[in-house]
Image: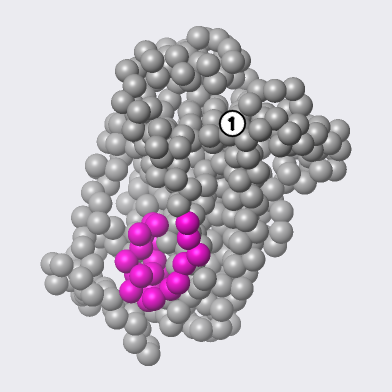
Amino acid sequence: MNANPQTERRDLVILGGGLVGMTLALAAARAGITSHVVDRADPAELTAEGADGRASAISTASWNLFRNIGIADRLDALGCPIEAIAVTDGMKPGRIDFRPEPEEGTLGRMFANRDLRLALFEAARGEPAIAWHTSATVIERERGEHRVRVTLADDRVLEGSLLVAAEGRQSPTREEAGFSLAQWDYSHRAIVTGLFHEKPHDGVAWEIFFPDGPFALLPLLDSADGRHRSALVWTVKEKDAAGVAKLPDRAFVHEVGKNMHGIFGTVELAAPRMAYPLKFHHSRNLIDHRLAVIGDAAHGMHPIAGQGLNLGLRDVGVLVDVLKEGARLGLEPGDAQLLKRYEDWRSLDTFMVMSVTDGLNRLFGIPGKLPSAMRRLGMGAVQRLPVLKSFFMDEARGMSGNLPELLRG
């Protein structure tokens, strides 16, 4: 903690110290850029056992970022490699298997969100370029001609050159700036939990599409006592969500087992169940005067492809790349030219990924035998075409397009 933040100006004032916000602070520090990080939460509560049962797929590009900011060693033993992805329409014949060649590496790694937070927070505590303000409430934001200023409820005043909104989907900073959103409600909820299962998953992530929504099984490391584990993300219609959430554990496991068609043998619950509403939003702007928005503050998408966090980490890589280049040219972080370059770089990539994800969800949600047959015909074509499979695997790894330096190998 910085003992006297009222008198110290730093380069960035980052509002939100979650996975994306704290990654930005650490990446910026590696580039010689200082920051205040302000978060409403208490880190001890965020990292408590059972506080967040979710797991995240970390793409190859995002792992490169973690390695380049010095937290990969803390995480290496905690992630489960994704060796392959199986995509199927209701477990009917005609699935796609995405499995890279051994020399191509994995398709990503699965981490518990808690482990990601612990690694980021531990690194932040030892980084002098970061002043971390926790359990803090922002009561005023000012963006002037030459600086930004944030006043906290305890009367501390934090100053910087650039304000960064990383507060998540309900970002008050984005709302205060008046950014308009393209948004809609999927009228679905994601039921998230962990499973023990009889058979090993062999590093395979399953994306099973049903008319009511996708059913994803994501590989996790075996438990300390050697039991096989996977994370479950089961999308159910809003009208059914309350009923599914209230099912006794035994009945819930029975329904899960029916959807799995025995691929992992018998299953048991390994974690509490949590439910999250699924909504789409995309900010039409990513910048304003001395302001940039990143992560879920800028875009929120369906979890169907597991790319939400990875998109936010790409925001981080691009923003730091732009600010670092600006510093080399003698420009301060809040310079309008730099912010415009960030917005231009991220807007197209974000829109394309979110559009494809939304389209897939809608395509597989069309009920009926004919739509299912057409989907499986298309999936069969992809299965037989190595060029198409390689394209989709590069997308899953996050290694396509114009990548910033931090996300390269």
Residue 12 visible somewhere in the drawing = no
Name the residue rendered at 52%, 71% in the picture: 284
Residue range highlighted in magenta? 163-184
Q: Is residue 276 left or right of residue 385?
A: left
Which residue occupies the foreground of this view, 40 or 178?
A: 178
172 in the magenta segment? yes
Name the residue rendered at 32%, 18% in the picture: 248
Task: Tell me the residue that label 1 is attached to.
Answer: 210
Name the residue rendered at 55%, 10% in the picture: 265
Q: Position of residue 138 (x, y in %)?
A: 23, 67
Q: Position of residue 113 (x, y in %)?
A: 42, 39
Q: Which amino acid type is marked by label 1?
A: Phe
Q: Is residue 405 left or right of residue 235?
A: right
Give the quarter of the figure containing the N terminus. Answer: bottom left
1 in the magenta segment? no
Picture colour scheme:
one colour
Which residue occupies the foreground of this view, 233 or 405?
A: 233
**Can you name the residue that lies furthest to the left here?**
154
Report how many numbered discs are placed on residues in the image.
Answer: 1
Which residue occupies the foreground of this view, 77 or 211?
A: 211
Q: Position of residue 335 (x, y in %)?
A: 49, 83
**Can you name the residue that lies furthest to the bottom here?**
145
